[in-house]
Image (cartoon, rainbow, N blue to C red):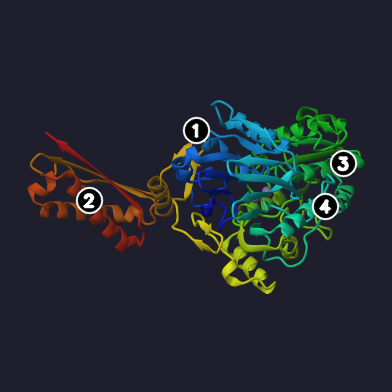
Amino acid sequence: MSDLRLIPLGGAGEIGKNCTVLEQGDDLIVIDCGISFPHAEQYGVDIVIPDFTYLIENKDRIKGLFITHAHEDHIGAISFLLPHINCPIYGTKLTLALIELRLDDRWKGPMPKMVEVKPGAKVPAGELEVEFVRVTHSIPETCALAIRTQHGIVLFTADFKFDFTPVDRQLTDMARLIELGQEGVLLLVSDSTNATTPGWGLSESAVTEGLRPLVAGARGRVLITTFSSHLHRMQQAILIAHEFGRKVVIMGRRMEQTLNLARQMEYVRFPRETLISMDEMSDYPPEQLMVLLTGSQGEPNAALSQMSRGEYRRLKVHEGDTIIFSTRPIPGNEGEINRVINNLVRRGANVITDAPTPIHASGHGYQDELKTMITLTKPFYLAPVHGEPLHQKAYKEMALAMGHAPHRIFVLDNGDPLELDEQKAWLGKPVTTGEVMIDQNEGRPIEMDKLRARQQMAHDGIVMVTLAVDRDGTMVANPHVEAHGVCGGDDVVPEIQDMLRGAIGRLTEFEMQETDYFRATIEQQVRKVLQAKTRQRPKVLTTVLVTK
Ligand SMILES: [Zn+2]
Ligand SMILES: [Zn+2]
C-alpha cells in the first residue's frame, strides 16, 4: 500500500488562495483553487494565486479538480491553472455555474469538462473516491469532501458552520458526518477561521432581525454593502426592502450577474418586481430605494469607495443616506475600510457598521461548532487549515483540551506534505509553494524583483544619475543627478555631484571601461551619500553615456 500525502499549496497558515493536493500512488486530486488579495505593499498586484509548480510537475497524475464551494478564495485561480492541466472539474450545480461565469471573464481557452455532483453523491478518482457532504456556509451548496483512501477516510470540512436555520433551509448532513465518524475518519482537515472565537456563531437568518429595524427607521436611501457572492444576505436584504415598499438596485456587474444566475436557478427567491435598474432609480423618491453594492472591504476601485470620494457619477452620497456595512472586515483591510467610512460620513451619510441586533453573521463556525465537527466525526488525526497561524494554534489548543493527543494534531504550512501510512503520520519534505502575484491588466505574474523595486521607490523614492564619459574614461560633462520622492533630495543632489567628480577621478581607465563595475561602484557611492545625509535607501539608477 502506498503512502497517502496531503499537501496544502495554499490556504494553510493563511486565509485565502485555498488549494490542496491529496495523493496516493498514481492518483492525485486537487481540492479547490482560489485566490487571495494583496497586502498594502504589493503595489500594482490585483490578486495572488498559489504557485502551481507541483501540479504542473505532476499533471499526468491529476484525476480531478474538486471544488467545495464557489467563493473566490476557492475558485478564483482556476483560470490560471487551466493552461497547465487537463482534468475534469467536479462541483455542485451552483458551484459549476458560478465557475463558468468567472471563466467567461478570465479564460479564453476551451472550456474544461465540468461534472455536476449532487450533495451526497460519490465520485471515483482512480483508486480514491470523493463523496460530497452538504454543510452550511455563506453560499448555497457548500460541500465537505469525504475522500476514501487505502488507509481510511480523509474528511475535508470545507468552509462550514452549523446553521440550523439557514436561509435556504438546506441543513448540514449531520447524519452522514456521524456515519463517517462511525466508519472511522483517519484525518479531519478542518476550517479554523474562527477558532479564536468562543461559543457558537449566529445563524445567517438572524441578520434579517438586525437589518429590519435599520431599514424601517431610515428616512432616505438605504445602501447595503456586502460580498458579491453573498446570495443569502442579498436575498434577506431584498425581502426587507420589499416589506418596506422599497425598490432594489444592484450596483456592480459581478454582484448583478451572480444574483441573476442564482435567481434563475432558484437558489434565491424574492419578488422579481422588487429589482429595478440604475436608470429607473430617478423614478423613485429616496425613501423607496435600496441599493446593494460591493466595496465593503474598502477596495479602492469599488463603486462605494468612488462614492466616498465623490467620484461616482451615477450616485452621489448625501445627507439622509443610510449606508450599512453588512460584512466583517477581512484582517488587514481595516485601514482602507475606515477611510471609506469616514469619507462617507463627511458627505453626510449615516454609516452603520454594527447594531444592537447583528447585521452580519460569519460563514465560519466558532469554537463550539469546530468542536462539534470533531465530536461527530471522531478523527484519528487532525489538521486545521483555512486559518492564520493564530487560528491554527487556537484550534490545536482546543483539540488538546478535548483530549486529543498532541502528536496527532498537525499544524501545516503551505508546501508541508502530511504523509500517512497504516501506522503513523509525519511531515515530509516540503514541495515548491509560494505567492504568484497577478496584475490583472497584464493577466500574468509580476516578478519579485519588480515588486521589490516598486516597494523601494514607494518607500524612499528614486535617484537617477547620468554620466557622460569619453572612451578614455574622462568625464565630458558634469554628472547629471535627479532625485524624485526623496526627502531632502534637493539638498543632497549637489553633494552627490561633488562626490561623483572626486570618485570618478580616482578610478583607473580600465575600471571605467568595465561598464558593469563602473556602474556598480558609482551606485554604491551614491547610496553611501544618501544614507549618511537622508537616512533613506532610494532606488539608484545610473546611466553611463560613452561619447566618441
Ligand atoms: Zn467560503
Ligand atoms: Zn474560504
Residue 353 in sight from this viewpoint: no
Which of the two residues, 412 or 530, is positioned nearer the viewer here? 412
Q: Nearer the viewer, mark 3 or mark 2?
A: 3
Dots 3, 2 in contact, CB < 8 A: no
Q: Residue at x 47, y 51 (%)?
A: 434
Which secondary structure lies at badge 1?
loop
Residue beneath label 1, please? 83
Q: Earlier in the sequence, mark 4 or mark 2?
A: 4
Q: Earlier in the sequence, mark 1 or mark 2?
A: 1
Q: Earlier in the sequence, mark 3 or mark 2?
A: 3
Identify residue for label 3.
239
Label 4: which residue? Answer: 207
Query: Is residue 272 positioned above or below 61 on the image?
Result: above
Say if 12 sits above or below 257 in the image.
below
Amino acid of disc 1:
Pro
State which mark lies toward you, 1 or 4: 1
Q: Would you name the residue on which mark 2 appears? A: 520
**Amino acid under disc 4:** Val
Tag 4 or tag 3, which sits nearer the N-term? 4
Q: Residues within 10 Å of mark 1 (few under 14, many from 20)?
A: few
Callout 2, which amino acid? Ala
